[in-house]
Image: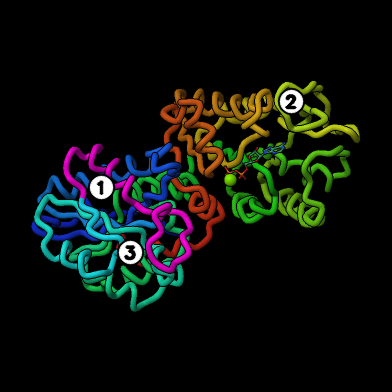
Amino acid sequence: MPSAARTTIDAIEVSGKTVLVRVDFNVPISDGEISDDSRIRAAIPTIQSILDRGGSCVLMSHLGRPSGNGFESAFSLAPAAVRLSELLDRPVNLPSDDCLDDASRAAVASIGSGEVILLENLRFHAAEKKGDVDFAARLAIYGDVYCQDAFGAAHRADASMVAVPQAMEGRPRTAGRLLEAELKYLSGAIDSPERPFVAVLGGAKISDKLATIRHLAGRVDTLVVGGAMAFTLLRAMGHDTGRSLVEASMIEEARAIIDAVDATPTTLLLPVDFVCAAAPAAGVETTVSGPDIESGLMGLDIGPASINSFSAAVRAARTVVWNGPMGLFEIPPFDQGTLAITNAMIEATIAGATSVVGGGDTAAAVNDLGLGAGFTHVSTGGGASLRMLEGGPMPGVDTLDLA
Ligand code: ADP
Ligand code: MG
């Protein structure tokens, strides 16, 4: 389990040096337009810190899932270079359509202090996803210092995350400001929480969150489980779940996990009622029932009594971590449970609690509501934040010299 970084980019002398920064510019792009630039914004503090101190930045990132056989315009980082240039208010040079060709190498070789280069999508080379050592050695030449700031990819062992810093052994290998914050809040909350410590889990599938439940059992005071994943647990307890989403193959595993949590001091808090409908669509007739649901209906959100008990648990917390929406929040009125948890977490934060949101869909839900600023920390990494909540390995962090 990685701990909060103590030696970060701010502690490294970068004047006159070229810092090779792994950023996460994997932004949503359609028709050449970036619909959400928050990942680019999140990298600004690190980049600015390097430039302000007389360093230069060579930025590298992946974007989407190109085939790995060379340039594909749909996966070009060119729109990200334009946006970054606007945000930094200085030129950003995307030298070529290949991060390792002569043009890219020449641009890096002649970079000047205060200048920024963005290399084209690393995944245009299949070697990136394979963690290839030769590919990494060629990238490693680009930097005097390695800086890891791509939290969203830090649970992956891609070449730019692991083999590049390995190839740069002997040169400083450090965390950027974003990675530092993510580690501080995610591992800080889990490893040394102020109590009561409450975790709220939800989302579609229990199979995605089993490792998280296992890791949090015994660590949190209360484990709140909503979302569709609660139905597999309720089925394991003998309840009728109607046509709600249940992972039939996981029912036995769900029984085992309930017993495992019961064997710890952690209290498991499950929904007692649901907002149900015949189909997951806007404008359908809804009824509240539970904990049993009749055969023709689907539970699509937690009900009012569950909202009350979940909100009370969250408001009483001094540390609260949340991953996974409480219902089918994309379709109103099934967004009310997720909205209620959002509000309860914001109230807890105002009262002095540390509140952390992880998970791609959960963070998107909170940010779409315009309420992200009400939390102590909203993670920029979906899979990576879940990995942290599982206490699993973070290859992109483990190669850094953070002691
Ligand atoms: P995250 O990305 O935050 O980890 P997940 O991907 O696990 O979250 O789950 C998010 C999805 O779960 C959302 O698309 C949401 O609509 C769905 N979901 C949550 N509760 C229900 C439910 N009761 N019925 C159907 N879908 C649900
Ligand atoms: Mg998701």
Q: Is 289 left, or right, of 280 in this rendering? A: right
Question: Residue at image x 48%, y 35%?
Answer: 355
Question: Residue at image x 84%, y 39%?
Answer: 243
Numbered mark located on residue 46 in the image: 1
Q: Residue flagged by tag 3: what amino acid is it? A: Leu
Mark 2 element type: loop
Q: Residue flagged by tag 1: what amino acid is it? A: Thr
Which quadrant of the figure has residue 372? top left
Asked if the residue at label 2 sits under 8 Å from ligand 1, the reply is no
Q: 302 or 272: nearer the eye?
A: 302
Q: Is residue 224 above or below residue 392?
A: above
Question: Residue at image x 53%, y 55%?
Answer: 387
Mark 3 element type: loop
Query: How many C-alpha atoms fall within 10 Å of the one at disc 2: few (<14), some, or many (≥20)?
Result: many
Can see residue 397?
no
Numbered mark located on residue 400 in the image: 3
Q: Is residue 3 above or below residue 170?
A: above
Q: Position of residue 294 (x, y in %)?
A: 90, 32
Mark closest to the chain's N terminus, 2 or 3: 2
Mark closest to the chain's N terminus, 3 or 1: 1
Query: How many C-alpha atoms fall within 10 Å of the one at disc 1: few (<14), some, or many (≥20)?
Result: many
Distance, label 3 to label 1, CA atoms, is: 16 Å
Q: Which residue is mark 2?
A: 303
Query: How many C-alpha atoms fall within 10 Å of the one at disc 3: few (<14), some, or many (≥20)?
Result: many
Q: Is residue 129 above or below residue 267?
A: below
Does the magenta run of residues contain 70? yes
Numbered mark located on residue 155 in the image: none
Q: 275 or 85: nearer the eye?
A: 85
- Determine the residue located farthest toward the right in the rendered image: 295
- Determine the residue located farthest toward the bottom in the rendered image: 134
